[in-house]
Amino acid sequence: MDYHRELIAILDFGSQYTQLIARKVRELGVYCEIYPYNQDINTIKKLKTKGIILSGGPSSVTEDNAPIMDRELLELDIPILGICYGLQLITMLCKGEISKSLKREYGKAHIFIDEKDPLLEGLSNGDIVWMSHQDRIFRLPEGFKSLAHSDNSPFAAIRSTERNIYGVQFHPEVHHTPKGKTLLNNFLYKICRCEGLFSPKSFVETAIADIKERTGDGNVICALSGGVDSSVVATLIHRAIGDRLHCVFVNNGVLRKNEVEEVIEAFQDKLHINLRYINGEDRFLNALKKVKDPEKKRKIIGRLFIEIFEEEAHKVGDVQFLAQGTLYPDVIESVSSKGPSATIKSHHNVGGLPKRMRLKLIEPLRELFKDEVRQVGRELGIPENIINRQPFPGPGLAIRIIGEVTKDRLDILREADSIVREEIEKNKKFKNIWQSFAILIPVKTVGVMGDERTYANVIAIRVVESEDAMTADWTRLPYEILDKLSRRIINEVHGVNRVVYDISSKPPSTIEWE
């Protein structure tokens, strides 16, 4: 069943929560896409969307350069839900009055129901919601009524008396609004009349049909890293076209301990996917000799990978398509026209192909978020050790070795990193951890081992929690875990006599050190 025929359009006004809105909507079984607030009205009409959600945003609708959507959207016979800034924008466009509040409202607030409505079914007087605003509605537009209020917002939820146009002053998409998901569910199913067609199963069915139609009798080549994204791409395409998929797994010499064996076992032995393994370890390490600058490391590894990949594509012969594991956040962040909150960084997966390869792109995951990719992987039967694998940078351990990359330094880091992975992954309490890894610092310190003075390496440990890697907080590991990590690394990894723990959050720091 094609879930695309049931679409919710989210217009982005710059909110830090825009992607979270999309993820919540999809968790509720409805497919949605994010568009810039100034998306052409004709495009919206062609989408035949079941509903529109207007995101929050950092601007004030009273500012001269505030982002404003086409007012004609309010004239379409499509249900609309405005969130925070979206509510205020609806009010302004419908000729209500917005003013600065004497008291700003940030954080938890309690709402009180003024009138029963399908949008608020399941919500009660005194329920907690999350507010983040300074402006508020001073006077409702003609033809609108109040559904709920808070202590500081006389109009915390409103609706049009003539059309399915709603607005809420709070953020239902954040977990600080406990019944926010109930409200979104009401909007999707009671107001937009969605059926709930989006699921891992429906995605797999639709993607396989699309891949078959797109590729015809052509061959597809895919760079397999062993990470969850490329693994799901490979398995999905293999399910669609079988041995016309040619996967290339390049050992760039900076992989984690046992990673080569794990990938080969999973894809050749368990999933029976056509896999070419290329051992480029010496080639990469020779190219990295005496290189300390992190950007140079990245460029050298990227260039060599493309060279090897091109060589293998040539050996395969008649290849027409290249498969990539591009995800939806990659697309949003890499295209400046996607809205005011979107232009953050460019991604190697988006438009990074050498023109001389002349291959057509297949990106079956470009509609999905990371957590959805994992769900699809389970639907496809991919082993859990691959599904739950933490994000791992393309340049691998090369950017977790600060300074020059050598075989000896790689051996030290691999062993230390393996201990971190083992201790974190075996503990079920740490399921929310986004990444946990070791870093080799270019510093040696004095220590004492067996009554002898040592002068050895320092290992830093980085453990963070995140939902999308755009922001991250360091994990408050229990002291007993930190103690065990330190003792194991110092006792088991030759050449290390000190372990430190990174307690920096992103921002201002990054997750990786380089």
Image: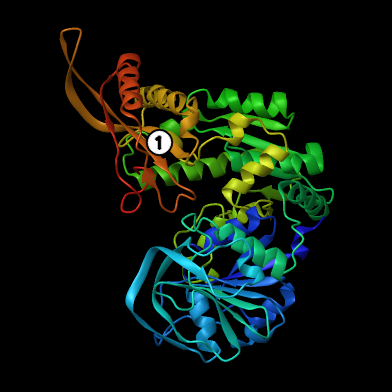
Residue sticking out furthest to the top? 450
260 lies left or right of 439: right
Q: Is residue 452 left or right of residue 243?
A: left
Reading the image, the residue beneath label 1 is 398
Q: Quadrant of the N terminus?
A: bottom right
Q: Residues within 10 Å of mark 1 (few under 14, many from 20)?
A: many
Say which element carries label 1. helix
Instruction: Decide if residue 447 is on the left or right side of residue 153.
Output: left
Task: Examine the rendered structure and indicate whether residue 142 appears above or below residue 245.
Answer: below
Viewer-side residue, 358 vs 391: 391
* Residue 54 x/y as whole percent: 56, 73
Question: Residue type at mark 1?
Answer: Ala
* Above-or-below relation of 375 to 96: above
Residue 364: x and y in percent read 69, 51
Q: Residue at x 81, y 42 (%)?
A: 241
Relative to the observer, which residue lies in front, 126 or 313? 126
Q: Name the residue nearer the viewer: 438 or 473.
A: 473
The C terminus is located in which quarter?
top left
Decide if residue 253 is in sight here.
Answer: no
Residue 123 image position (x, y, % from top left): 57, 62
